[in-house]
Structure formats: structure tokens, C-alpha cells
Image (cartoon, grey):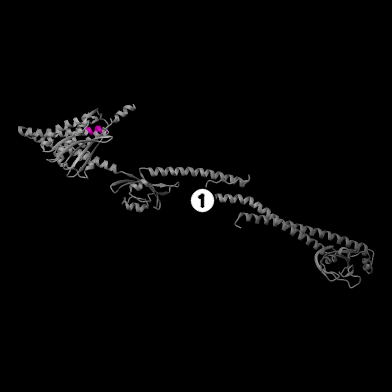
Amino acid sequence: MRSIKWKLIAMYLGLVLIVMIVSGTYILLSLRNIEIDKSRQRLEIYAEKIQEQVIHGATEETFQENLQKTVTNAMGIQGNILNSRGDTIATTTALQPPYTQYTDQAILFGMNGTASFSSGKKNTDSFGLLKEWLSYAMPVKTDDGEVAYIVYTRLDAGDMQTSLNETTKTIIMAVAIALFLAAIMGYVFAQTLTVPILALTKGAKNMASGELKQSLEVRSNDEIGQLTSSFNHMAAELRKNMSEISKEKNRLEIILHNMSDGVISFAKEGELMLANTAAEDMLHLEKMDLDFSSFIKKFDINTGVYLDMGDEPSKKVTFPVGKQFIHANFSPHYNTKQEMEGVVVVLQDVTEQKKLDDMRKEFVANVSHELRTPLTTVKSYTETLMEGALDDRETAIEFLSIIDSEADRMAFLVRDLLQLSRFDNKQVHLQITEMEMNSYLETIVKQYKIHAEAKKQTFFFQPCDHPVVIFGDRDRVGQVVNNIISNAIKYSLEQAEIKIYMTEDESWYKISVKDTGMGISREDLPRIFERFYRVDKARSRAMGGTGLGLAIAKEIMESHKGRLTAESEYGKGTTMTMWFPKKRPILEYEQEDLLE
């Protein structure tokens, strides 16, 4: 009975059964009442006939004879004449006394002067058979109003009951046939309702399991048909919405997994909800499978960061991961009821930023140090001269010579700083010309040969076997070459060998300066092009260097669309290589002029 189909059939059969029982009962009662009324009329007519034909104008002695002559026991009706005491004095059921004595409620009413009818009284007939009777008692009064006789008639109700029983059987048969037909009609009716409902149920289950591409057949135009149409419309709209949601989800996943920033999402209970590829790479994890507590502990993040942040704003923490520095922004997110649902962590790799920040601090410190030393010297010697040393000519000249030297040192420093500033601000415009490097380098080597010989160093140039023409600013290229050669001579010991040679490939001319000097350690080599960075700070300052020469040389090479690289082995020497493109480079300010 869990199916609505069987419930409908049961309800339909119950309704038909109730209607048939009620209508059948009503019919039976109506027929019984009709039959009883007919029988009553017959009994009344029969009693009146006995009164008129037997009692009227006759004596008691003739009642029996006259009753037998005038009235016969027709259609099962019995006629009796009773005296005022209820004793039978004449009857149609017997020819002579003793007569049957009757005890009937209708007789009692007749003895009291009232005609009465009674039904359902069971009694025996003249043959001693128990039957059900319909009886009628009518008083016959004298002129004084006294009851003289009682006419008592009876009718056998068996025929009526038989007729009613036959009618009852017919009604029962009709009920059975009606129930059978009702069951068939109810089944058909239930099918018309349940088949579309079952189809809708199956469709809903399929939809719940993810099968959205379905359309149900609309079998009718009634409410069920309208419901099926609505279901098909809902399925179509759901397919459309799910398609949009899927596209949006894919778009978000693509954005998340292609973001340079790492994104991690934790639920309110601490379990991991989402982590993109960038986050796993930043944290050096093959797969992010940490909950919030494990994440905090593993990377030793400040305990001030906790999961249930409530209404607090986002918190920012920077922590190391290996040699990297990761900046994490912890932000809570809420649902539509403004209840916190979890925390989103956005990770940014700030290693380069921190490195640049450290370099900036170091640069400021170096500039301050480089300026403070000559300024302190100038101030000290100036104060000494003002206090009386000016009168000593030799001392004054010596002091003034030192002040002049320190002023030159500051001037060189400021010049180099201004030059770097112009490179940073793209304010340097190169005068590009064709330069034949064999002859150009031979000239520079001749200039520095005397310095190398002073330190007993072997200094030579190995020219290329064919002309090498580059495109560059002669003064700027000379500045780079001079810086590299002077460094090679300056930082190489006596008896060292310094060699200049050229190589090439498909795209580049490479000019290399190789020495057998002290070399540069592996830790210092990546930083030699940083501003103010010195491998041997004390020795560099003693030789008059500002620590900006290689930084400027690198900027000049990059402005020529070239490169400056270094290879070195500590204790064995260094090779500095200048890379010039074979094709004439288009500089940035030239590109701007072309666009205009």
C-alpha cells in the first residue's frame, strides 16, 4: 500500500462499496416499506370485508359459518373474529372449535378500541409451522361505543421476505459486479495518474544523480501534463544553469591554478578546502594536504594567527620557506548570514622584494659610509689647518693635497651615482656607430701595457683573424673595456697573465678579458654586479674603487642590448665577457620615436 496507485484503487473501491451499500440498503428498506404498506392495505380491506359481510347484522353463532362461506383464505391471508376479551370465536384456519388463541400486541390495541398493525411477529400456522406474520386488528363497536368484537387478520410475510431476499441477492451481485468494474476503472484511473508521477520520480532521481539531459513525454493537458511540462522546463533551465556554473567553476579553477599568488582555503573546522599549484610550489610541497593547525606548526607561523578570527580584519605574516620568503595574508570569509565559514590564505613570494629591500638598505648604508669617510677626513684636516697648521707651509700643503684627493673621491662617487641614476631613469642616449674592435682593442691594450709591466704582469691581445664590427657608443664601450682591464690589472698579483681575445657565434660577438688573478669565490660571484658590492672591501677602498664600476658597466652593456658575464674560480682567476649583438640593436628611445 506504499504505492499511490494501490491507495487510489483502494479508495475508489471503498467509495463504490459505500455507495452501493448505502443505495442497496435504501432500496431494500424502501421495498420492504412498500411491501408492508401493500400488505397493510390488503389486511385492512380484508378486515373491513369481514365486518361488512360476516359481523354486520349477524349473531356469534353464525360467524363461523358465514366466515367460511363469504371469505376464503386467499393469498395467504387469515381472517379471525375475536370477542371483546380476545378469545377467538370464528376463524378461517379451522372448521370447528377449538380455535387458535392469539397473543398479539395489535389485539391488545383492538381490545382498547384502537385499530393497530404489527409486523415481524413470529407464530405457527394451522399446520404448526413457524412463520413470520403481518397482522391487523380492527375493533367492531356497538352503538354505545363499546368494543363488541375484534376482527384480526394475518398475512404470511414469507413471500415478501423471499422477494426481499431475492432483491438482496441481486443487489449483492450488482455490488460485486460494480466492485469488479470499479477495480478495473480504478486501476486504469490510477495508471493515468501514477505513470506520469513514476516517470517524474524517475526523472527526478536521474537528475539528482547528475543526468540533466532528459525530457519527459507530456501525455495530457491536465495538471499532470502541466507538471511534466514544468519538469522539462526546470530540467532545461537547470542544465543551462549548471552549464554556466561549470563554466564559471572551470574559469575560476583556471584562474586559481594560473595565478602567480598562492591561494589556500580552510574550513571553519580547520580542514583543507582548496590549494592551487602556486601555493604548493611556494611551500615546496608535492601535494598540499595539511589542515590549518598542521600548516601553522609546519611553517612556524606567528601564534597570533588563529582559525576563528571572528570580525577581526585580515592578518599578514612573512615567514621563510627554505631560501625564500613568503608573505601570507589570512582573511576570514562569511556566508549570507554573516557567519564565519573559514579562512582564505593568499601567499606571495616576496624573496626578490626582500632582496631588493635589503639591497636598498645596503646601498644607502654604503653611500653613507663612502661619503662619511672622505667628509670626516676633509673636516678633520680642515679643523687642523684652522687651529694653526696653516702657518706650517709643508704641513698645510700636505693637508690640502689630502683634502683635494678626498674631494676628488667624492666627486667620482657622485659622478658614478648620477650616471647610474640616468641609466635607471632611461635618460642615457647612446651615439651608436660602427666600431672595428681589433684596432680599437689594440689601442686600449697599448695604453694599459705600461701599468701591467709595472706589476711584472703579462698583458697581451689576441686579435681575431677577420674584422669584427660592432654597433656601439665608442665612449661607453671604452668605459666598459677600461673598467674590466683596469680591474684585471689591479686585482691580479705580480707575474699574473692577462689575455684579451674575441669569439663569436651566430648572434653574438664575445670579447673576453681573462686573468690569472686571485679569482672570486662562488658565494660572491652572483653579487659582483651589485652597487657598492666589493669582494675585498678593505683592499678595494685602498685602491680607490667606489664599488660602482661593474654596476655601471653592466648597465652600459644592457643599454646596448648586450650582456656582461663573469666566470671565476677562486685562486685561479676570472674571465669577464662582453656580449655584443651582431645586428644593430634598436634602442628603447628609438622604438618610441618610431611609434610616434
- Residue at point 25% right, 42% down? 358
Position of 62 relative to 525 (above/below): below
Position of 282 relative to 94 (above/below): above
Magenta segment, prevailing SS (helix, strand or loop): helix
- Which quadrant, please, contains the N terminus? bottom right
Residue 436 visible in the current orientation: yes
Tell me, yes or no, whether the highlighted magenta stretch contains residue 238: no
Residue that sits furthest to the front in the current view = 465
Residue 251 or residue 57, whichever sits in front: 251
The image shows a total of numbered marks equal to 1
Residue 296 or residue 140, whichever sits in front: 296
* Location of residue 512 in the rendering, given as x and y in whole percent from the top left corner: 21, 37
- At mark 1, the secondary structure is loop
The image quadrant that residue 131 belongs to is bottom right
Residue 582 or residue 483, whichever sits in front: 582
Mark 1 neighbour density, 10 Å: few (under 14) some (14–19) many (20 or more) = few
Amino acid type, callout 1: Ser
* Location of residue 102 in the rendering, given as x and y in whole percent from the top left corner: 84, 69
The image quadrant that residue 127 belongs to is bottom right
- Residue at point 57% right, 51% down? 201
- Residue at point 14% right, 33% down? 448
* Residue position marked by numbered label 1 in the rendering: 209
Relative to 350, 548 lies left or right: left
* Location of residue 150 in the rendering, given as x and y in whole percent from the top left corner: 87, 66
Residue that sits furthest to the bottom in the current view = 98
Residue 151 visible in the current orientation: no
Relative to 124, 427 lies left or right: left
Tell me, yes or no, whether the highlighted magenta stretch contains residue 423: yes
Query: What's the magenta region?
Result: 419-424
* Location of residue 583 in the rendering, given as x and y in whole percent from the top left corner: 28, 31
Relative to 114, 566 lies left or right: left
- Which quadrant, please, contains the C terminus? top left
